[in-house]
Amino acid sequence: MKHEDVRTAALPSGEQVPVLGQGTWFMGEDRRQFQKEANALRLGLDLGMTLIDTAEMYANGGAEEVVAEAIDGRRDEVFLVSKVLPSNASHRGTLLACERSLKRLKCETIDLYLLHWRGGHPLAQTIAAFEDLIRAGKIRYWGVSNFDTDDLEELEAIDGGNAVATNQVLYNLTRRGLEYGLLPWCQSRNIPVMAYSPIEQGRMLAHPALIRVARECGTTPAVVALAFVISHDGVIAIPKSSAPQHIRENRSAVDLQLTPGQLAILDEAFPAPRRKRPLEML
Ligand code: NDP
C-alpha cells in the first residue's frame, strides 16, 4: 500500500493507515454524477488519501458501487472501510450483508468492517459474525461506529470484544464533547477514532474564528477544521468531497500545523468540554 506522504495512524495491530481519508455519504444517489464521484475518489487516491469510507446504507449500496469504479485496478492502494446496518447485524444477517457489500465493491476483502451504530441485535452475535468473516478472509479487521464510552466498555467485556480496531464517531470543532472521556479512553487503548463529518457537512465554514485562522494560515476554513481534528493523536478524518478543488484543499490539511495562538483562537470560539457529555451523532 502506498500513502504518498500522508501522515499515518496505527491500528491496534500496528498497521498504519493515513490520518486523512475520504468519505462517500451521498455518493451514488444520482447516476449522472457516478463518473464524477468515482473520479473524485481517484484524485484523492492519487494525493495519498487512500482510506475510503463507505457503507451499505449510503444510497442503498450505490456509494459502494461508486467506490468499486474508483478502485478498479488499484485495490492494493486502498484501505477500504464499509459498514453493516444495525438492522442486519444478527450473526447470519452480518455474513449476508458483507457478501452483498463485497459484490457491490467488486472485491474480495473489506479491510475494516464496522457496525454502523448500536441496534437491537446482541453485540456478541455481531462479533461472532465478524470473527467468521475474518477467518474466511472476507474482512481483515472489525470495528464500531457511534459507540460512546459505556458502549465500548460493554463491548470490551464480551468475548472477543477487545479486538475492536476503530470507533467511527462525529467529531469536529462544533462537536468536541468526545474530547472528555471517549477520546482519551480510545487513545489509552490505541483504538483510533475515525472522525466523521469533520467539517460538519460544510455548516461551520462561515464561522468568523475559522475564517480568521484560515486567513492567518493562507488557507480555507475547511482546511483549518480538518487540521484541528487530525492534530489529535490517533484521530483519522474522512471528509467527503466530489469537487477536485476541495479534495486538493483537504489534502493540504495534513501539512498544516496550527500554532498555539491559532489553537487558542479556536478554543475560545469552540470551547473544549469540561465534563462528560453524551456522544452526538448525525
Ligand atoms: P463532511 O463534514 O465530510 O462534509 C461534506 C460536505 O462538505 C460536502 O457537501 C462537500 O461538498 C463539502 N466539502 C468537502 N470539502 C470541502 C471544502 N474543502 N470546502 C468546502 N466544502 C467542502 O460530512 P460527511 O457527513 O459527508 O462526513 C464525512 C464522511 O463520514 C461521510 O461521507 C461518511 O463516509 C462518514 N459518515 C459516517 C457516519 C456514521 O454514522 N458512521 C455519519 C456521517 C458520515 P463537495 O462534495 O462539493 O466538496
Image (cartoon, rainbow, N blue to C red):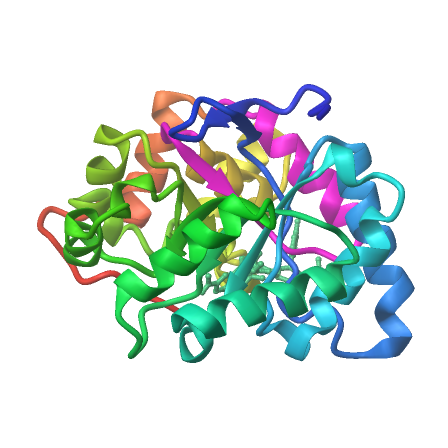
The picture places residue 68, in percent across and down from the top left corner, at 80, 57
Part of the protein shown in magenta: 231-257
Left/right placement of residue 87 relative to residue 214 reads left
Left/right placement of residue 280 relative to residue 150 reads right
The picture places residue 6, in percent across and down from the top left corner, at 63, 24
Give the answer, above or below, for where 141 lies relative to 63: above
Name the residue furthest left: 275
Residue 72 seen in render: yes
The picture places residue 58, in percent across and down from the top left corner, at 62, 72
Q: Residue at x 70, y 55 (%)?
A: 241
Along the viewing direction, whichever of 149 and 76 lies nearer the viewer: 76
Tell whether position 256 is magenta: yes
Q: Residue at x 78, y 41 (%)?
A: 75
Along the viewing direction, whichever of 163 and 234 lies nearer the viewer: 163
Q: Residue at x 89, y 42 (%)?
A: 73
Along the viewing direction, whichever of 172 and 164 lies nearer the viewer: 164
Q: Residue at x 18, y 62 (%)?
A: 278
Give the answer, above or below, for where 63 lies relative to 131: below
Give the answer, above or below, for where 165 lies relative to 146: above
Tell whether position 96 is magenta: no
Image quarter of the N terminus: top right
Tell which quarter ligand 1 is in: bottom right
